[in-house]
Image (cartoon, rainbow, N blue to C red):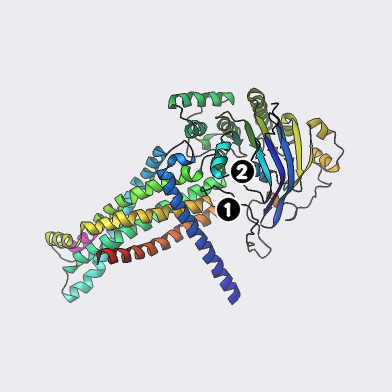
Amino acid sequence: MIRRALEFLGQRLLSWLSLLGGAWGLVWRTGYWALFPQSSGPGGLRRQSAAEQMVRVGIRAVPIVCLVNVIVGMILAVSMGGPMADMGYITAVPKIVAVAVTRHFAPMITAIIMCGFVGAAMAAELGTMTVSEEVLALQVSGLNPGRFLVVPRMLAVVAMIPCLTVLANFMGMFGGYLVGTQMLGIGSEQYQVLNMQSASAWDVFRGSFLKGPVFGMIITAVACHEGLNVKGGADGVGRATTRAVVFSMVAIFVADLLMTLLFNSIWGK
Amino acid sequence: MTSAIPAIEVRGVHMTFEDRRILAGVDLVVRPGERMVILGSSGGGKSTLLRVMLGAYRPNAGEVLVFGRNITTMEEEKLNELRRRWGVVFQGGALYNSMTVGENVALPLRENTMLDDSIIDIMVRMKLDLVGLNDVEDLKPAQLSGGMAKRVSLARAIALDPEILFFDEPTTGLDPVTGGAIMRLMNDLASKTGATSVIVTQDMRCAFDCADRIALLHGGRVHAVGRPEEIRASTDPLVRQFINGEPDGPIPFRLSLDNCAGELRAPLRTKSGRRPRPTASAPQAPGRDGN
């Protein structure tokens, strides 16, 4: 029984390490292909495909990113409102919302939404292409599937996540504003002043333009690696999609923690 | 046509999937301009052999020479250059579903040449016309019938005027008339372009109509090779059973893991349902994500 449990855990660990290694390798190779697109053939960088992916990844995700971040901002304000009011610090709510949203929630919630919205779709799409021999057809035609399929997706996600995260910042703070002014009795002008005192452009920049691209790379690399390595038929695609989403989420949490520690050590709290 | 170097030479290729032997020392020579049909029963390993010849699988032992160059040890980038000299028609067409028919046929031209878009458009129409299709450029693969998808796949395969054409089960799943049309196209293209053809099939009609030579693969080895009339006149019990489609004979009626491994697409599982650990000899499909 214990042996079986250890075997199971060992197999899971090896499988995750293999995924981590594969995704990491894909990030490096994608970077190389993006910088030197002629290296794997004369086709060059597929700009049109990258633009199409940007629309799929970025524009179509705007409504869901806005909605979820408004709700997260509202949840933050509601959950902080009670304790702060009891302590007589109701005016701390706009500050708490501003700091929490800009430093953590906007980048992380956006990344998690993208995991489900983009990562799952990518893993399923590439997995289906693998199963239907489309990827094999690319490979044996001399077209590098990595350059052909992964680079446009990686560029699109890495470019669009920062934009979506900036939007998420405003939406999160707007959610807090709605609760603060409508439920907690803080004046509209007062809320905005307090909010602006704590929300710094530097925090927005760090969350959106430093954390965002890293999250984007994680989501794309994991999803593409899983999709391109699907084994079996439809059930294999399902398993790959699930693994892509679960692993990306865990990796995003870990990366967020590491980056927060790094930023704090470099720029202080 | 008269070149001394074989178009393809397979030398003692062994292939093992998770401890199960699929190819056990295949030797085969395909001459330039020849139409070689590889026949085989289920589990004979013919699809695996095709993938080895395409460089999608690296064999555990043996080598494959294409135009005299060993592709089994070749770097992926050099192999990609060589791959531009052949075209492949897959069983299901393997058309890129996110692209239109025109974009599918244009893809090899866009990715491998510096031709202007207007020239590529003309060439796409020419290639589609060669396979008997007109005004289908704007359709999506999902809108095509099986026969049309095969034709588009053929048009894409000949986009770069390849020297070798590989066909994986070109007539499987098609009605006799459509299958006959595909066979005529294959023969026409081979005679017009002088390209070498390698056709993997189980369809005896396709084999006898299209082949200059037939290789019968069984038990992971080439069991018999010869011209169609030689194969037809063969007294070998296995060849007789295969071409006559008899259920009883050297090819067993009952299938087990031992004699149908080549047909198993998913990784094998043991009786307990647990997937056996991959072995060091398990083949890899390199280059999927570019590695």
For disc 2, the marked residue is B55
Do the dots labelled 1 and 2 sit on one chain?
no
Tag 1, which chain? A
Give the label on residue A231, or none.
1
Query: Per the image, is A176 magenta?
Result: yes
> Which residue is located at x 38 percent, y 46 percent?
A155
Q: Quadrant of residue B273?
A: bottom right
The chain letter under disc 2 is B
A122 or B278: nearer the viewer:
B278
Identity, as a three-letter code, of the amino acid under mark 2: Gly
Find the magenta span and give its range: A175-186
Quadrant housing the N terminus of chain B: top right
Position in image of residue B274 (x %, y %): 63, 64
In magenta segment, residue A71 = no
Q: Amino acid at mark 1?
A: Lys
| Residue B262 place in picture, x, y as percent | 69, 50
Count neighbours of disc 2 (C-alpha within 10 A) and say few if under 14, some if 14 to 19, many if 20 or more: many
Q: Nearer the viewer, mark 1 or mark 2?
A: 2
